Amino acid sequence: MNSRTSNISKRIMIGAVAGGLLLAGPAAMAQSKQLILQTQPEPTVIELQGNMQIDGDGNINVTPVDPEACTATGTCEGVEVAINSFTINSQASSVTVAQGENLTFRWQSRGAWACDGSGLSGWTGNGKSANNSGGISVSTNSITPGNYVASLNCYNGSVQAASPSTVAIEVTDDEPPPPTTPEGCEDRTLPSTWARKTTGSNSCSYQYQGSHGLITTHDCRHFNQVWPFDFDEQTSLQRVLGVGTTNGGRAYIALEFNSGNLDPASSKKFTVGQPQSSNLDNGPKLYSISRCPGDFNAAAILDEMGPGCIKSSLISSFSWGGTDSWSNSNVCALEPNTRYYFNIIYTNSPVGTDPSQIVPWPDCASGAGCGTRYSADNY
């Protein structure tokens, strides 16, 4: 129990504010929408969904918004199970990828306890969660080029969805396309002597437990294919990102993400620490959030993004937030529903160095290369 909840009073108020008056008890039944815990230093407010009543013994009874939802302890007779969405790489009917590219499966169901996947190596398996908006990444490195049909079937005990959802997949033997440069970023990229980390043997992601090896199924061009959730859905989860000895240490990481429905007052961070993996050297680095991949042009970032969006560090954290953070020099302010890139480069060159003059940290070219442990955290 944390300090905020250690002083919860014995009285729990179920209330609605009417004319500034907090109503409690039976008189508030019809209007009640919040559970208010009298915690310190401020009350904890829990929004209640659905119709709520308090019986004569003071018990709280809530009818859910979806009365047909089935729980593990409830009765499931007659429950309807439906698959609301099933996409691969954001496509709902068909997708074509080159062998070596990753596929990201996302799905949402209703009334289900679990789902099964079939039809494609790496996706086939039972007992998947009923919903996964963050996505599961599947590598096509070992998949023979050809046509496949990936299926999702969701169920609740013996009750199943009316029919599985499917997506057609074509895996080609073409070369994976190179990362694209967004319009307006042509003059903001590093020299061609630098290489961007991608996937497969050129991945940037390392295991921080067990074998500490390179995770070849993570696609380092996309945030949500390294972390199993979208950028705006961050929870505390570690990843070790590094550049190995690729290209004599002249490699950088650019994770594309969408800021999503970012609240203006939100505030989150990447906690940065020693890699503890594969003998990687946690060298000095520049990192930035920018509208351009591999962008370390401090003047352009300041002009476009405001303060707090590029810094030099060994293990200092990197903070970001909504538009309320615009004037905070320690926090990178982001617009909602906007594409950005989280950029990392291992160098001792200070902030403000012309990108053409940035030099790699020498230790990245030897041993196991450079890497750092990043934890996506809420404040």
Image (spheres, rainbow, N blue to C red):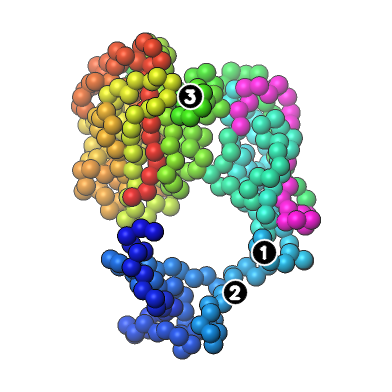
> Residue 100 appears in which quarter of the rendering?
top right
Q: Mostly what secondary structure, the magenta segment?
A: strand
How packed mark 1 is, by other alpha carbons closer than 10 Å (few <14, some 14-19, many 20 or more), is few
Residue 233 picture location, percent across and down: 45, 48
Residue type for callout 2: Thr
Q: Report crowding for label 2: few under 14, some 14 to 19, many 20 or more residues within 10 A (C-alpha).
A: few
* Residue type at the position of mark 3: His
Q: CA distance from mark 2 to mark 1?
A: 15 Å
Magenta residue span: 138-162
User: With respect to residue 328, does 192 lie above or below?
Assistant: above
Q: Residue at x 38, y 44 (%)?
A: 377
Disc 2 and disc 1 in contact, CB within 8 angstroms: no
Q: Secondary structure at mark 3?
A: loop
Looking at the image, is mark 2 or mark 1 earlier in the sequence? 2
- Amino acid type at image mark 1: Thr
- Observer able to see residue 304: no
Q: What whole-number distance in Å separates the C-alpha atoms at marks 1 and 3?
A: 40 Å
Residue holding disc 3? 212
Q: Is residue 47 visible?
A: yes
**Quarter of the image where one finds residue 182:** top left
- Disc 2 element: strand
> Which circle's residue, 3 or 2, is located before the other in the chain?
2
The reply to whether callout 3 and callout 2 are in contact (CB within 8 Å) is no
Q: Answer with left or right where residue 130 lies relative to residue 2.
A: right
Q: Which residue is mark 2?
A: 63
Location of the N terminus by quadrant is bottom left
Above or below: residue 221 compared with residue 318? above
**Mark number for residue 341?**
none
Q: Position of residue 104 (x, y in %)?
A: 59, 37
Q: To which residue does mark 1 refer? A: 73
Q: Secondary structure at mark 1?
A: loop
Q: Is residue 267 above or below residue 346?
A: below
